[in-house]
Image (tube, rainbow, N blue to C red):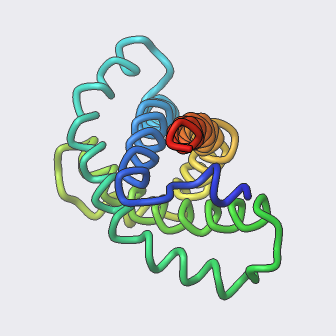
Amino acid sequence: MDFYMKLPRNRKDFLLFLGIVSVLSVNIIAPLITCFEIGFTIKNWLATYQIMPVLWIVVVILVLITHKPASKLTQKFIGSDNSFNAQVLINCLINVIMMSILLTIIGSWIGMRNLSLQPFEHFFYKWPRNFSISFFVEVLLAQPFARFFMYKKHLREDRIYDDNEESVI
């Protein structure tokens, strides 16, 4: 029941879910990581928003690219008989690992507005921090909010469908 009510049912739902998660994630994770890099000031926090549109587009593209491989990998680690929460947590973990690896490199390039080897040179120092921030934001904020939104949307749609069905009878 949780899968049906809290997760996207179709492509339109998937795009809405992706939009909610990506907007929340980019608006929280990117400024936090930037401020850990260059210092926690309002100026630095606001400077992050200059690159936000480009970063958001890159995040959406990467999510679309990594979605199927992450789902397949999740199925290898966890069976369909496991609970909804277990499956969602493992899927989130795998997605965040993949995305944080890619965005530790690509996000640095976008932020620096420069292609360089620096993200590779500092990768093993920065990736654990970036992964941790991303994982906690996804698990505690972005994904639960998106699932709650999907749940409320599906309740409303099902109620409207049930009401229409009753009026026909």
Q: Nearer the viewer, residue 23 or 130?
A: 23
Horizontal and vertical percent position of residue 44: 37, 21
Q: Nearer the viewer, residue 45 or 74?
A: 74
Question: Outermost residue, top direction?
Answer: 42
Residue 128 visible somewhere in the drawing: yes
Question: Outermost residue, front direction?
Answer: 169
Horizontal and vertical percent position of residue 95: 54, 64
Horizontal and vertical percent position of residue 20: 44, 38
Horizontal and vertical percent position of residue 119: 36, 59
Question: Outermost residue, bottom direction?
Answer: 76
- In the picture shown, does residue 34 fall above or below 43? below
**Residue 143's image quarter?**
top right
User: Position of 28 compared to 158: left or right?
Assistant: left
Residue at 48% x, 25% y: name it: 39
- In the picture shown, does residue 61 fall above or below 114? below
Q: Nearer the viewer, residue 1 or 112?
A: 1
**Residue 106's image quarter?**
bottom left
Q: Which quarter of the rendered picture does the C terminus lie within? A: top right
Question: Outermost residue, left direction?
Answer: 114
Residue 137 visible somewhere in the drawing: no
Q: Nearer the viewer, residue 64 or 137?
A: 64
Q: Which quarter of the rendered picture does the N terminus lie within? A: bottom right
Residue at 28% x, 34% y: name it: 52
Residue at 63% x, 67% y: name it: 91
Residue at 33% x, 28% y: name it: 48
User: Position of 82 compared to 77: left or right?
Assistant: right
